[in-house]
Image (spheres, grey):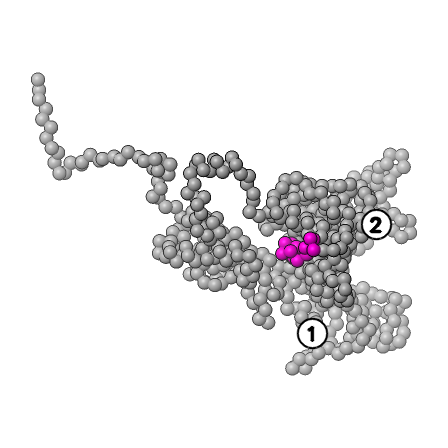
Amino acid sequence: METVTLAPSSATTTSPKLTKKPSLTDIRYPNSEKKVYGCDHVKELLEQARADALKQYRRLVQAINKDKNVAIRLPKATGAGQSVYSLRPTWLCLQCPNVATTETRDSHDKNHKFCAESSSAHLYCRACADIVHDPTLDEIRQLRGRKRSHSVFRSDVDTKILAANSSPVPCRALGLRGMYNMGQTCFMSVVLQSLIHNPFIRAYYLSESHRSSECERECCTSCALDDIFSEFHSQEKAEGYGMVAMLQSSWRGGGSLAGYQQQDAHEYLQFILNSLHSANIDPDEKEDKAEDCACIIHRTFCGVLQSTVTCSKCKNVTTARDPFMDLSLDVRQPGQKKKENKISMTTGKDKGDKDKSSAPPPAPVGLTECFDRFTAPEMLAAADYTCTRCASAQQATKRLSLARMPPVLPVHLKRFSHSKNNGASIKLDMRVRFPMTVDLAPYLTGAPGTGPKGGKKEVNGEKKDKDKDKDGKEKDKEEDKGKQQKPVYELSSVIVHKGKMDSGHYVSFSRVYDEWFMFDDSKVVLVDENEVLNSEAYMLFYVVRDVEV
């Protein structure tokens, strides 16, 4: 039998490797030593200055989640030294105190590559030009800057016990909830939804500025709205809300609103704003002028419209200023004929349905075209104007302009028309193009082409000289005041009327952060931005982009 001798291997021969039996941790968390980063720039930052970077990011997250922190929404300062509060999210630099807007975040110092978003603390990398998700930084963001709690170290058994014996409660509700139709009440629902998602009205009621428990008014609409905010923002609910208190208050104070007939949403908006104004002021105090009222309703919706009438003979200028809570714009194009909705007595159908099917649809009109016509010069006949300087009837030119803009601008598109002669009513089923962002600077008082300059003017019948600066140039203090704030507005809500004049239905769209939702009575649906822009709008709500504080 042949014998085999096992000699020790030489030093050059590869030694066999000793393998370690994998532990339970290795099985649960494979490749735990392999680190993952959001991008190469985050990796470079954490490898070079990990402690300082994590400390600074944790401070930013804590500042973002701090209540009533105005500093994170002040991206810049105006020429007069006043700060401008941004209603849209800003971006906080990770390496310096800079606060930038979405438009200016990439123009910051190139060496400062990272900034955090002011509402969610998501990290943005300027070098990648995108939001990056790093596991280490995302953990700090999810913990809202606080230290890790005991819940992280709970075992699977503890988690199962807690899940079986507790019910989840969300940390915050976004107010996404529909309202039950309680008998032709869709016109109320859409207006209330626009108020619920109005940032100024929401901030007022969620800060308990009106407490229904302390109000002594009977059938108070402000108390009813306060209850709606409390219900909508306390916890998420899928079912609709029965607005019994608001319906009762509207019937009690609205007069013609009582009953189950279909009403006009624009008329209800005017009623509810007036009712909320009365409910949020001291009844013992003397009421100020609308433009000087300090209530939340006038501070949010009240603007000033200026009417300038110029005599064609002596060029005398008469100016009158009137407050407004919304603007009604004519959508009918010049030369377009009215078409009445004639109903057949035998079939009950619209007689014009055959003509409508064969006739081409009317051309769409843009929102800026409606503003152009609203502020365009209008010729007044001699029978309609008497010049105080000429002391006789004269032809004149009238022009409207916006002397002071409100933070929230409701725009009413006049789709419904009522004839005084035969009492017939019509609806203009034409598309109106409206943008997500609109600049109303061309329509302000003092803008080029909105009115005459120089000379004397009469304000509400009283002659006043324009102020002069050091160089002797004439100027109007109120007009200059209106120029300081940039009138750039962003779309917040849209109210749509579907169907015919007396048998239609209202739905609305509202923006919640950067997403759009459709509210159809008790149904709430996430929609695309294009669906909002293609809707047949009846009312538009625009919110100013920046607010001076």
State the residue position of label 1.
477
Three-letter amino acid code at the position of disc 2: Ser
Query: Regarding mark 1 in the picture, which secondary structure is present there?
Result: helix
Is 236 situated above or below 157? below
Tell me the magenta residue range.
202-214
| Label 2 crowd (10 A; few <14 / some 14-19 / many >=20) | few
> Residue at (43%, 48%) from the top-left corner?
148
- The label on residue 256 is 2
Question: Is 410 or 275 nearer to us in this picture?
Answer: 275
Give the SS element for disc 2: loop
Q: Name the quarter where the N terminus is drawn.
A: top left
In the picture, measured across the screen, residue 89 lies left or right of residue 343, that is left
Residue type, mark 1 in image: Lys
From the top left corner, tell me how far across and down residue 330 is, in percent: 78, 55
Question: In front: 79, or 309?
Answer: 79
Q: 10 Å neighbourhood of mark 1: few (<14), some, or many (≥20)?
A: few
